[in-house]
Each structure stands twice: as structure tokens, then as C-alpha cells.
Image (cartoon, rainbow, N blue to C red):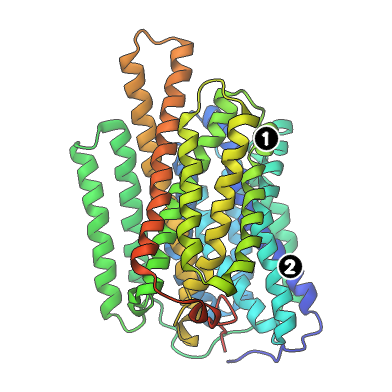
């Protein structure tokens, strides 16, 4: 490795603060935009069928390019990748904040995801080379993890404040000064490091994976407007499947694979990645409809909607705390069966919402149990994804876990949005003539149908774990120390 000796790098804690800001910005960008989405759709005239692209354009690019971004940062230079990611993220955020139409906003969100795929692995890899002492490294990753867990809550509140008192555009524009300040600090405080070895990048693999995911999402979108049996729907869904099959075939033969198949073909890890995909699919899409329900149906302001979504984060923090205690005693399998069942049940309870539902009596407990179930999943999932993995593959395995959550979120958001749009249209057709009251009921019918499907998808993750996962507590306890692998 051609890098400075950084075990005692004097500015490592200041560098951690800079890296933490970058991580916070990435995490914030998901929830902050969700709160702004209802206002943005009205302002730019985005249709119900297309609204999911504000979310999926980001998650497809992020998930599809994350593994490539990790390799680029390792061999090109992590500081260089970090700074380039910051500049690109700031530019994409400005483009989205100033967007005058839906297409420009979607493109900006895709660019944000692409640069986040460069920025996120560079940030995590920098921590591994900045902190060599085990205790210091644990503290550094504790800070990093706390930001990952608490950043979503900050995003919910900040998104509400910015949308309500300024404009939804500032939910994107706020990234510009933050990114530029962090970039300037990184130039002075963050040391460069890179890994020696082959610098060949699997660009064809990244292109096949990303285009395949985009084709699937577009197929789901066309199903909402043209129907599942329409030629254009079948064409893009079939093309997406074909491209993803070609991606796997390419990964099996290329000497420098983006996704080494040995990582996902091991039984326990394969079960972890598949369950991660399903959890992401059910969870990301459902948050979209919760936001629209709060603001569009219950008439909450953006700030009230953000505050009303916080119980999910509270539940996640409680669940994660419980899981951290139980994991070394009982292993991952039990919690990863119980967690999705709790979260899926909570999600399914949201399918009973009406036009006027009590927040305290219904929504509050459902959100808390949804978060509690997710907290019980996230902690053991991170350990299970690294069971039996070699040190050389630890970074790739961690990146695959993150990618599956983003990819699952992309596909789930698109699919559930299509299901919601179709259910709402069916309700309207069965209750003519349309009135304002009927329109509100139709919207809720769409949301609740999506919640039911989302709950089922999350619960399916428990079945996957029950069938595939066999790792005991001792195996889970012996996973590599560093989630992203040690670049050395």
C-alpha cells in the first residue's frame, strides 16, 4: 500500500469529523427528500406513476455503482475519491435544487446517487487507515454508526423545516455549502491512501447491473400507466431480467469482477443478502407512502410530517440496542426471523388506515414496532453478511450488503408505487362519479394496498433466513473487525 503511516496520524480525529459530515449528508439526503417530495411533485407537475423516480433514480445509481466506487477509491486514492465525490454531490444537489422540470430533477437525483457511490466507500475506507488502534477504531466506527442511525431522524426534521419555511428546493441546495466546506477541510486534514495492485475496473459489470435495474424500474413504471400485460411493460421487464442475467454471467468469467460470486453463493451470506434485498424493498417504498399519507390525507405540514415519522427512528435505535446485547448470546438467526415478522406485522397494520385515522392510537404504535423490528434486523444482518468471509473479501461483502439495501429500495419503491397507483385507479373506477372525498379515499386505498404488500415482502425475509441461514453464534462472533475490510 502506497500510503502514509497513519496509525498515529495527529489530525485523525479532525479527519473523522470531516468524514462524519460526508456520511451525515448522504444519510440525510434520503429522508430529507422524502419529506419534500409531496411539495416537489406539485411544483413540477410530477405524476403519481413517476414520483417514485425521485427516490429510485438515487438508489439505483447508488446501489448499482457502489461496488465500482469502492474499487475506484481504493486504487485511485481515497482522499481523491472523497473530494471528487463531494464536488460531484454538490453539483448534483445544486442541479436538483434548481430543477425546472421532472426530468431534470430525476437526472440530478441519479447524479447524486452516482457520486454518493464514490463518496461512501471512500469515507469508510479512510476510517480503516486512519485508526489502527482497536479501541480508537471502535470509537470511530461508533461515531460513524451513530450518524448512520441518527441522521435519518435529523433529515426528517430538517426536511420539514426547510420545506415548510423556505422551499422544497432547499432540501437539495443545503448540500452545496456543506459539501464545499467539507471538501475544503478534507484537502487540509485528510491524508491520501491507496491500495497497490491491479487497477482494472469492471466497468461492463457496472453498466450491465445499472441498466438492468433501470429497465426493471421503468417496466414497473409503465405497468402503472399501460398495464402489466402491455408490450412496453413486458419488453422492459424482460430486458431488465436479461441484463441482470448477463451481469451474473459476466461476473463469473471476468478476472476482476465487480461482484465476486463466491461472496453471495455461500449459504449464510446469500441468505443475508437476499433478506437485505427484501427488507429494503418493503421498507423504502413504504416510507414514500407514509409521507404522502401524512401530508396529502391527514393535512400535516411538512414539519409535522417529519416529526410524525420520528417514532420509526426511535424504534430502530431501541431495537438496535436490544440486538447488540442479544447477538453475542444467541447469534443472528433468531433475531433475523423475529425482526422481519414484527416489522412486517407493523407494516401490515398500516393497511387498515383510513381517511381520518388517529395518530396516537394507530400510527404511533405501528411506527414504533416497525422501527423495533428493523433494529432487530440491521445489527445481526451486518454481522451475518461477513460470516466466513476472507479478509480480502470483507470490504466487498460489506459493499454488497449496502448495495442490496439500495437496490431492494429501488425495485420495491417502483413496484409498490405501481401497486398503489393501480389500486387507487381501480377504486376511482368503481366509485363514480369522482368527488374530492372519493379522491381522498382512492389515494388511501392505494397507500394501504402498498403497505400490505410491503409488509408481506418484509415478512418474506424471515422465511429466507429460516431456510438458508445456519450460522451459529460462534461463527457470527468471529466476523472481521472492520465492516469495510482492511485495505491493507
**Secondary structure state at the residue bearing disc 2:** helix
Image-quadrant location for residue 276: bottom left
Q: Is residue 480 above or below residue 274?
A: below
> Toward the viewer: 73 or 361?
361
Q: Is residue 117 left or right of residue 50?
A: right
The alpha-carbon separation of the residues under discs 1 and 2 comes to 26 Å
**Secondary structure state at the residue bearing disc 1:** helix
User: Can I make out residue 191 in this image?
Assistant: no
Which quarter shows the C terminus?
A: bottom right
Q: Is residue 192 above or below residue 289?
A: below
Residue at point 41% right, 72% down?
A: 269
Residue at point 43% right, 88% down?
A: 198
Mark 1–mark 2 contact, CB under 8 Å? no
> How far across and how far down the image is residue 450, in percent?
41, 36
Total numbered labels placed on residues in the image: 2
Q: Is residue 308 left or right of residue 376?
A: right
User: Can I make out residue 479 in this image?
Assistant: yes
Q: Is residue 291 above or below residue 328?
A: above
> How far across and how far down the image is residue 463, in percent?
36, 57
Q: Is residue 423 left or right of residue 43?
A: left
> How far across and how far down the image is residue 348, in percent?
45, 39
Residue to which mark 2 is pinned: 18
Mark 1 crowdedness (10 Å alpha carbons): few <14, some 14-19, many ≥20: many
Which quarter shows the N terminus?
A: bottom right
Residue to which mark 1 is pinned: 163
> Toward the viewer: 71 or 383?
383
First in residue order: circle 1 vs circle 2: 2
Amino acid at each position: 500500500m502506497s500510503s502514509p503511516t497513519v496509525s498515529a496520524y495527529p489530525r485523525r480525529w479532525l479527519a473523522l469529523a470531516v468524514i462524519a459530515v460526508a456520511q451525515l449528508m448522504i444519510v440525510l439526503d434520503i429522508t430529507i427528500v422524502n419529506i419534500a417530495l409531496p411539495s416537489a411533485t406539485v411544483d413540477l407537475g410530477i405524476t403519481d406513476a413517476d414520483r417514485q423516480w425521485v427516490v429510485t433514480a438515487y438508489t439505483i445509481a447508488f446501489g448499482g455503482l457502489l461496488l465500482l466506487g469502492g474499487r475506484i477509491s481504493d486504487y485511485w486514492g481515497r482522499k481523491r475519491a472523497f473530494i471528487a465525490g463531494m464536488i460531484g454531490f454538490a453539483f448534483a444537489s445544486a442541479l436538483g435544487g434548481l430543477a425546472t422540470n421532472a426530468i431534470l430533477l430525476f437526472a440530478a437525483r441519479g447524479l447524486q446517487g452516482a457520486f454518493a457511490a464514490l463518496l461512501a466507500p471512500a469515507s469508510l475506507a479512510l476510517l480503516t487507515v486512519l485508526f489502527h488502534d482497536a479501541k480508537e477504531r471502535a470509537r470511530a466506527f461508533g461515531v460513524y454508526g451513530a450518524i448512520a442511525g441518527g441522521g435519518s431522524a435529523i433529515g426528517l426534521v430538517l426536511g420539514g423545516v426547510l420545506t415548510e419555511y423556505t422551499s422544497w428546493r432547499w432540501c437539495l441546495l443545503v448540500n452545496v455549502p456543506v459539501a464545499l466546506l467539507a471538501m475544503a477541510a478534507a484537502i487540509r486534514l485528510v491524508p491520501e491512501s491507496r491500495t497497490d495492485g491491479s487497477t482494472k475496473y469492471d466497468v461492463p459489470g457496472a453498466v450491465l447491473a445499472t441498466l438492468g435495474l433501470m429497465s426493471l424500474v421503468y417496466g414497473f413504471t409503465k405497468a402503472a400507466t399501460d398495464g402489466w400485460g402491455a408490450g412496453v411493460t413486458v419488453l422492459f421487464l424482460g430486458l431488465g431480467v436479461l441484463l441482470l442475467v448477463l451481469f451474473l454471467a459476466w461476473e463469473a468469467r471476468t478476472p476482476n469482477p465487480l461482484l465476486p460470486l463466491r461472496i453471495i453463493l455461500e449459504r449464510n451470506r446469500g441468505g443475508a443478502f437476499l433478506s437485505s434485498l427484501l427488507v429494503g424493498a418493503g421498507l423504502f417504498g413504504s416510507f414514500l407512502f407514509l409521507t404522502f399519507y401524512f401530508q396529502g390525507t391527514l393535512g400535516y405540514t411538512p414539519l409535522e410530517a417529519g416529526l410524525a415519522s420520528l417514532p420509526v427512528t426511535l424504534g430502530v435505535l431501541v431495537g438496535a440496542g436490544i440486538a447488540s446485547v442479544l447477538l453475542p448470546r444467541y447469534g443472528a438467526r433468531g433475531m433475523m426471523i423475529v425482526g422481519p415478522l414484527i416489522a412486517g406485522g407493523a407494516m401490515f397494520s398500516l393497511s387498515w388506515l383510513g381517511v381520518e385515522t388517529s395518530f396516537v392510537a394507530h400510527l404511533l404504535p405501528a411506527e414504533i414496532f416497525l422501527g423495533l423490528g428493523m433494529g432487530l434486523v440491521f445489527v445481526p444482518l451486518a454481522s451475518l453478511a461477513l460470516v466466513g468471509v476472507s479478509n480480502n473479501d470483507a470490504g466487498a461483502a460489506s459493499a454488497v450488503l449496502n448495495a442490496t439495501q439500495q437496490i431492494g429500495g429501488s425495485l420495491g419503491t417502483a413496484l409498490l408505487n405501481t401497486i398503489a397507483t393501480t389500486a387507487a385507479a381501480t377504486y376511482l373506477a368503481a366509485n363514480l362519479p369522482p368527488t374530492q372525498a372519493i379522491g381522498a379515499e382512492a389515494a388511501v386505498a392505494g397507500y394501504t394496498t402498498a403497505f400490505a404488500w410491503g409488509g408481506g415482502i418484509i415478512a418474506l425475509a424471515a422465511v429466507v433466513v429460516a431456510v438458508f441461514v445456519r450460522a451459529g453464534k460462534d461463527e457470527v462472533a468471529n466476523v472481521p473487525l472492520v465492516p469495510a475490510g482492511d485495505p491493507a
